Image: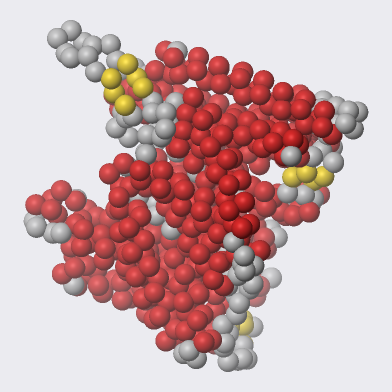
């Protein structure tokens, strides 16, 4: 029993770290543009498929294909936002959110149109799991974990130390003040979209490396992504990480009491609980 | 062909109900609901289970659907009543996914992805199918008429004015002494009840329901219907519903004419077109074909003006 719990907790930490990557994307867009951008779901799928093409058709190893997933999903994110969502923003955040749901459906179906509904797996070397004190861990799991950590470290370094990262935080904190200081909000918005959707794409690929991908990959993960962002505090990047780890471990531990199909219900239950008890999330909205 | 047209008219009526339901929250109160498919599903399952397994009359099943959906709606609204609308957007979208998961996995109750078949319909089996369809169309039209009139009454009542005040600025409404949270929860529950009734009518018409029928695409249909018709306007909801059914069927025929596409590609193309349709309407005609008109009584000294839409 204890061994099982340890195994699930470890799996949960791994899954939570991967989940943190798209959750950062979702929360970053919320912080800067002030609307829940549901197209994170479809950019997750786009990244997963871009990485899959790079991995299986071009023969890149998984670690290099993740970079392709980042760039393709990031560029798609900027283009989609510029052309389709940005014009809706003057009508308000909720109208834009509706537009985002519509756009998600469109993008998901573009992927379906091109690739079909079949499940696809990445070309990965078959490796034996390691056994450590009765706990199993796979080399691929460790690699995914490492890739997620690298991606997140990159984001933190970018936000903390670069001029553009500081500009992003400034706009998130107070758009009016930022514009008075001469920060170009449009540029910041574009950059945020690129990084955030790139992260969504990386998250999609990492999820796919664990299992397989199809056009609904993004939609299946999105409930956990929302939960991670809301539990941690919507708009807070460290919050998204804490929230993702909480949801990741919670989903795995739920296997002790619930059928695996209900994993993503954990996220929804966590949202209800957090909004009832501590609506600003564990770390509070707008904490950096 | 006649059966086909009657079926489309029934669907248009059901979409009209759904759009009217959405209008109560989104159009009148300014609260978002991106989980329409979930409330629709709750209604469909509640009525199907109550009438098939519980053996209650269909009318009681429809009432149960309204109550179940309203309870779910009230829970969502209470949880997020004090928060920004974004949270409601997230939570309702999540809700519809959870409903689908539960419906797919609680085999003992919902029969999982195989769905529930043999849901009773009024006079089904006792009259020829054509007569059943015509009768059902009558029932749907009657329901739409009743709910439309109720919504119109609501819109022009002091209660409806309070809802619009909350939509336009809930702080002002609160300062004016309106119990904003109670209003929001009631409006959301009322709207969910209408969505639930639509779900129940759908279940009794098709006699078969399964989780995949309640995909997020259904939510897009309904939002498209209301937005295309005119948000805030009950007439717009009716017009939009007819347009959406027409548009959906048009895409069915249009994609059928394109050769050399796999069935999955045709399905994908249709879904993408419907999403694109909503994006286009939001962009080009955000106030819809029948924009909301509120004639405001001029304050002394102020010029008389007719305001279209709202500052949402």
- Report the coloring of the rendering: secondary structure
Q: Residue at x 66, y 30 (%)?
A: B197
**Where in the figure is residue B244, as x and y percent of width and height?**
54, 40
In the image, B63: left or right of B24? right
Check the image and name the residue furthest to the left: A181
Q: Quadrant of the C terminus of chain A?
A: bottom left
Quadrant containing the N terminus of chain A is: bottom right
- The foreground one among B290 and A195 is B290
* Residue A189 picture location, percent across and down: 25, 59
Query: Which residue is at 52% across, 67% downward?
Result: A111
Q: Would you identify the image quadrant in which residue A31 lies?
A: bottom left
Number of numbered markers? 0
Question: Considering only vertical position in the picture, is A238 above or below A178?
Answer: below
Front residue of A187/A79: it is A79
Q: Taking B210 as reference, is B37 left or right?
A: left
Q: Is residue A209 above or below residue A285?
A: below
Q: Residue furthest right?
A: B126
Q: Residue at x 63, y 57 (%)?
A: B256
Q: Where B222 sits versus A232, above or below?
A: above
Spot occupied by residue A126 in the image (x, y as percentages of width and height): 61, 91
- Can see residue B117? yes
Where's residue A211, x and y in %?
60, 75
Can residue B170 be seen here? The reply is no
The residue drawn where x is 30% and y is 50% is: A87
Q: Relative to residue B255, is residue A241 depicted above or below?
A: below
């Amino acid at each position: 029993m204890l061994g099982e719990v340890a195994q699930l907790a470890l799996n949960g930490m791994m899954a939570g770290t991967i989940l943190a990557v798209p959750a950062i994307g979702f929360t970053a867009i919320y912080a800067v543009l002030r609307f829940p951008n549901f197209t994170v779901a479809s950019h997750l799928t786009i990244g997963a498929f871009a990485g899959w093409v790079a991995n299986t058709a071009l023969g890149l190893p998984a670690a290099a294909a993740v970079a392709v997933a980042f760039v393709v999903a990031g560029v798609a994110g900027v283009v989609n936002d510029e052309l389709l969502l940005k014009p809706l923003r003057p009508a308000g955040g909720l109208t834009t959110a509706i537009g985002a749901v519509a756009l998600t459906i469109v993008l998901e179906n573009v992927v379906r149109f091109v690739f079909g509904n079949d499940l696809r797996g990445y070309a990965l070397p078959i490796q034996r799991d390691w056994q450590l004190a009765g706990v199993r861990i796979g080399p691929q799991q460790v690699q995914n974990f490492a890739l997620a950590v690298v991606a997140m470290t990159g984001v933190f370094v970018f936000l903390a130390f670069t001029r553009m990262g500081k500009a992003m935080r400034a706009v998130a904190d107070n758009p009016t003040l930022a514009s008075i200081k001469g920060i170009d909000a449009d540029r910041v918005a574009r950059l945020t979209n690129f990084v955030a959707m790139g992260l969504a794409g990386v998250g999609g690929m990492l999820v796919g490396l664990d299992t397989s991908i199809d056009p609904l990959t993004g939609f299946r993960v999105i409930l956990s992504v929302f939960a991670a962002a809301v539990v941690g505090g919507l708009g807070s990047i460290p919050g998204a990480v804490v929230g993702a780890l909480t949801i990741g471990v919670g989903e795995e531990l739920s296997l002790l009491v619930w059928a695996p199909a209900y994993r993503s219900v954990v996220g929804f239950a966590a949202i209800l609980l957090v909004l009832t008890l501590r609506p600003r999330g564990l770390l509070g909205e707008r904490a950096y | 062909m006649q059966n086909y047209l009657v079926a489309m008219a029934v669907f248009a009526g059901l979409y009209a109900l759904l759009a009217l339901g959405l209008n109560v929250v989104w159009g009148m109160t300014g609260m978002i609901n991106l989980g329409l498919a979930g409330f629709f599903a709750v209604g469909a399952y509640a009525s199907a289970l109550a009438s098939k397994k519980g053996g209650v009359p269909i009318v009681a099943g429809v009432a149960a659907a309204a109550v179940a959906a309203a309870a779910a709606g009230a829970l969502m609204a209470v949880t997020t009543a004090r928060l920004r609308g974004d949270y409601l957007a997230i939570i309702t979208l999540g809700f519809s996914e959870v409903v689908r998961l539960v419906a797919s996995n609680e085999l003992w109750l919902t029969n999982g992805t195989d769905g529930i078949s043999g849901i009773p319909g009024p006079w089904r089996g006792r009259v020829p199918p054509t007569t059943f369809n015509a009768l059902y169309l009558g029932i749907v039209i009657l329901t739409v008429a009743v709910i439309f009139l109720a919504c119109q009454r609501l819109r022009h009542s002091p209660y409806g004015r309070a809802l619009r005040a909350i939509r336009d600025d809930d702080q002002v409404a609160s300062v004016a002494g309106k119990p904003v949270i109670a209003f929001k929860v009631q409006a959301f529950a009322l709207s969910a009840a209408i969505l639930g009734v639509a779900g129940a009518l759908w279940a009794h018409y098709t006699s078969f329901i399964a989780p995949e029928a309640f995909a997020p695409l259904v939510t897009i249909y309904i939002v498209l219907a209301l937005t295309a018709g005119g948000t805030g306007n009950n007439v717009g909801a009716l017009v939009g519903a007819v347009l959406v059914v027409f548009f959906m069927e048009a895409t069915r025929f249009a994609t059928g004419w394109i050769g050399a596409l796999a069935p999955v590609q045709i399905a994908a193309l249709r879904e993408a077109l419907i999403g694109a349709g909503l994006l286009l309407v939001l962009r080009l005609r955000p106030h819809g074909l029948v924009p909301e008109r509120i004639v405001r009584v001029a304050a002394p000294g102020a010029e008389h003006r007719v305001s279209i839409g709202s500052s949402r």
